[in-house]
Amino acid sequence: MKNLRMIINPLDKKSHINKEIYGNFSEHLGRCIYNGIYVGENSSIPNTDGIRNDIIEAFKNIKLPVLRWPGGCFADEYHWKDGIGDKATRKKMVNTHWGGVTEDNSFGTHEFFRLCELVGCEPYIAGNLGSGTVQELSEWVEYMTFDGVSPMAELRRKNGQEKAWKLKYLGIGNENWGCGGNMNAEYYSNEYRRYATYCRNFGGELFKVACGPNSDDYDWTESIMKNIGSNLMNAISLHYYTVPTGNWNSKGKALTFSDDEYYDTIEKTRFMEELVTRHSEIMSRYDKEHKVGLIVDEWGCWYDVEDGTNPGFLFQQNTMRDAIVAAVNLDIFNRHSDRVIMANIAQAVNVLQAVILTEGEKLVLTPTYHVFDLYKEHQDNTLVYSYCTEEKIDGRSLPAVSQSVSIDENGNLHITLSNCSLSESYEIRCSINDFEMLSASARILSGAPHDHNNFDNSDNVTIKPYSVKTEKDNIIIELPPCSVVAVSVTSK
Ligand code: AHR
């Protein structure tokens, strides 16, 4: 076991950790919405208005703060009026992006807001700029948020929703450099300005999110900042997926991978740090006051689909490797919370790095879900200074340990740590400056890198209580290989 030092200074307060950093993304893709979150009112699976009760409870347990919907690439082909009114007469549509399946539009605006209401999370709507019209999006905003007398507000009432919903987050287009219309940044900026102008603030301030860069496309960010500016947009989105092989034609498998591929994955996911730093630097040149936030509204691992599943459905399993990926990214977002104001893992259920998998009535919480559970204590806290001596994985420039520390409104500290090493344990002696410690409690998620939960064994990887030692102002935390630990420290 190697010894490492960690220093925490609770007096050195950094930035507010928006709870929205712990958000999820749900798209009409594969079995995320239909046969996932939404099973319909007539299903034998216990549900509330068609939404699975076990999923509602699971989201509530991790205090899911925000959910993005309806896409993704799907968003720029979605016509919201097809998803309202009597379900029996709603138009059927073909989901051309994802598997070419026919959808009956039974999950639409009302159902999405009901889901958010049941979970207690903020809705984040992704609007259609790619194939829609300014009028269509502006009417959707009117339909959702206007409480007065108007054609769209009347239509909403006719469809059973008297009061306008509360909507803060509105994305204007998705990946418009690609599936959202193959635009260049200047063209998109002009389109964005037109759309944003007519998305009126009917009830409260709409928080408008512009389509941001694909990964390291720094020119896109530069152009958006220059051509849109902070008066018409509140945030820019960033998408970055971790592909273990770096090859989109053969991405690697979720369950079978070598140690090298495991470390490659963690190395690739750590690229998020550079992305956030460099995009933020560009944004700061135009926006010194940080009026425009960065929203990482798609992130996570993207593997080859599981054998025998529809390639258009992007269904993949989830192991302890994914848990480490989640911990590393959430630490990065915490550490950059002066700019990163929201993040949404892709995706919530049955798609990509899902927090929940379902099969018929069965449900599995993935290792990634458990990381969101361990990290939920950071929500709406203040990030404080922390430093840990850096230990590299043999033969790589990859740090073994990742950490972030926050202080809550009662003055208690919350430490999250992960160890990506597959062979080395670390004993971390953590000293806390100017802090009178009363008690420390901890929880751990650990296992072999391939460990996962499936429908026959849903509790193979779960959070366990953990003990840490305390000595005066020090906490001694042992980090086993491939583990994620959360420690809460109360003050006197
Ligand atoms: O999350 C899957 C897809 O990845 C989304 O639809 C798209 O925005 C991205 O390319």
Image (spheres, helix red, strand yellow):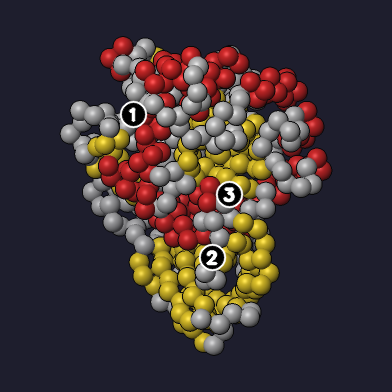
What amino acid is at disc 2?
Answer: Asp
Q: 467 or 200: which is nearer to us?
A: 200
Mark 2–mark 3 distance (CA, rounded to whole Å): 28 Å
**SS at mark 2 in the image:** loop
Q: Which residue is mark 2?
A: 408
In the rendered image, the residue lying farthest to the front is: 149
**Which residue appears farthest toward the bottom when viewing the image?**
472
- Decide if residue 417 is in sight here: no
- Residue type indicated by callout 3: Thr
Q: Residues within 10 Å of mark 3 (few under 14, many from 20)?
A: many
Residue 453: x, y in percent?
32, 51
Q: Mark 1 against mark 3, which lies toward the viewer?
A: 1
Farthest residue, direction left: 44
Q: Residue 254, position in %: x, y?
A: 43, 44
Work out whether mark 1 precedes mark 3 in sequence or the reverse, and give the earlier one: 1
Judging by the rendered image, the residue that carries numbered circle 1 is: 34
Residue at (46, 57) in percent of width and height: 376
Residue at 65% over, 25% down: 196
Residue 171 place in picture, x, y as percent = 58, 31
**Type of residue at label 1?**
Tyr
Asked if residue 16 shows in the view, the reply is yes
Q: Residues within 10 Å of mark 2 (few under 14, many from 20)?
A: some
